[in-house]
Amino acid sequence: MADMTSESRCMVMKWVHSEIKDPADPETALKADTTEEAYEKYDWLFVFEAAMVTHLHADCKVDDITILEHQEKAIAKLKNMKHKQGSIQVRLQKFDDVIKECETMGATVTD
């Protein structure tokens, strides 16, 4: 979750498991209902399920203004990239990652 945006991370952290647990099931004590419980119980499947439900199967509608804002942020991030020191390979990998992020958001990247 470290490489997620803050909005995505908040969505995952706020998700609560709504499935009713069976008290007779011995695995019930090992399953988490919240992200905090997941960290305490090491229930990494909960974190995966929360990310999947909030991002892959989200039925929410996103308006055009929000999409445009995300595209503009991605393009601004690309414009502000500078190589001051360090490995050129690392810099090129970061550049490629930002380009992919722009393309994923649907932003048109030009020279």
Image: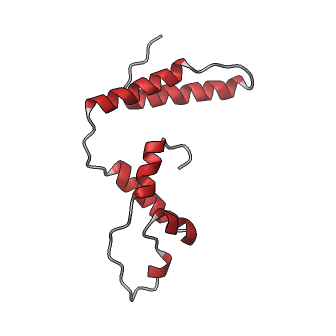
Task: Give the farthest residue toward the bottom.
Answer: 24
Identity of the residue drawn at 34% across and 26% down: 68
Q: Position of residue 104 (x, y in %)?
A: 40, 32
Q: Position of residue 28 (x, y in %)?
A: 44, 80
Given residues 56 and 63, the one toward you in this image is 63
Identity of the residue drawn at 59% across and 21% down: 81
Q: Tell me if residue 44 comes above or below residue 108 in the rendering.
A: below
Q: Position of residue 70 (x, y in %)?
A: 39, 30
> Toward which corner of the image does residue 46 lie, by quadrant?
bottom left
Q: Tell me if residue 79 comes above or below residue 73 in the rendering.
A: above
Identity of the residue drawn at 32% across and 76% down: 20
Q: Total marks drawn?
A: 0
> Toward which corner of the image does residue 90 lie, by quadrant?
top right
What is the image's colouring?
secondary structure
Identity of the residue drawn at 46% across and 31% down: 101
Q: Position of residue 27 (x, y in %)?
A: 46, 81
> Toward which corner of the image does residue 49 lie, by quadrant?
bottom left
Task: Give the farthest residue toward the right.
Answer: 86
Q: Tell me if residue 11 comes above or below residue 72 in the rendering.
A: below
Residue 24 located left or right of residue 43? left
Residue 99 located left or right of residue 19? right
